[in-house]
Image (tube, grey):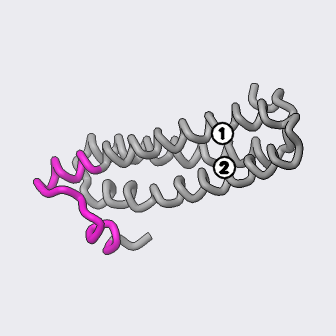
């Protein structure tokens, strides 16, 4: 259980929120792939920035917490590995969505398609 590490609840809540966000992103990517829905695939890719921003925020917070008290290094390192793994799952979801887009359109999903999609 992640709460047994003994850190402030805000860190656990951040990781849980990131997990929920990535799980939704992965489900959406798989749904887009199965239904060959190019618009849904673009939406998944555009939401990857949110996961990346959450990872960067948690990384900075945990790093600061470790610098403030070296006794937190072990626990924070475990959470850093968890958040990095979740961020990678988000990247894989994006890859699935890009494949779904390609299957439907025959084109690679570029930055211009992602920017045109309303968030």
How many angstroms separate mark 1 from mark 2 (CA)? 6 Å
| Magenta highlight on residue 108 | yes
Residue 112 within the segment the image draws in magenta: yes
Which residue carries the number 1 mark? 80
- Residue 106: image quadrant is bottom left
Q: Quadrant of residue 95?
A: top left
Q: From the image, which quarter does the C terminus lie in?
A: bottom left
What residue is shown at x 66% (from left), y 49% (from top)? 59
Q: Where residue 28 sits in the image (x, y, percent)?
A: 40, 47
Dot placed on the residue nearer the N-terminal end, 1 or 2 = 2
How many labels sit on residues?
A: 2
Q: Which residues are magenta?
A: 98-116
**Residue 63 placement (x, y as % from top left):** 73, 48
Position of residue 44 measured from the top left corner of the image (x, y, whole percent)? 39, 55
Q: Where residue 90 sits in the image (x, y, percent)?
A: 46, 45
| Most foreground residue, 83 or 117 | 83
Residue at 75%, 25% (x, y): give it. 1
Residue 64 bears which disc, if any?
none
- Provide the secondary structure element on which disc 2 rests: helix
Residue 94 appears left or right of 33:
right
Kindly identify which residue carries mark 2. 59
Q: Main secondary structure of the magenta part?
A: helix
Relative placement, left or right, of 59 versus 95 is right
Task: Mark 1 and mark 2 in contact? Answer it, CB < 8 Å.
Answer: yes
Nearest the eye: 66 or 81: 66
- Identified at 43% across, 42% down, the residue is 27
């Amino acid at each position: 259980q992640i709460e047994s590490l003994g850190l402030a609840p805000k860190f656990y809540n951040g990781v849980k929120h990131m997990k929920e966000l990535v799980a939704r992103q992965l489900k959406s990517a798989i749904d887009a792939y199965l239904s060959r829905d190019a618009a849904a695939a673009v939406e998944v890719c555009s939401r990857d920035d949110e996961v990346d921003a959450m990872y960067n925020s948690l990384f900075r917070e945990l790093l600061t917490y470790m610098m403030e008290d070296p006794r937190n290094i072990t626990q924070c390192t475990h959470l850093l590995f968890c958040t990095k793994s979740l961020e990678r799952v988000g990247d894989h979801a994006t890859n699935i969505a890009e494949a779904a887009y390609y299957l439907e359109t025959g084109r690679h999903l570029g930055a211009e398609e992602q920017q045109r999609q309303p968030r």
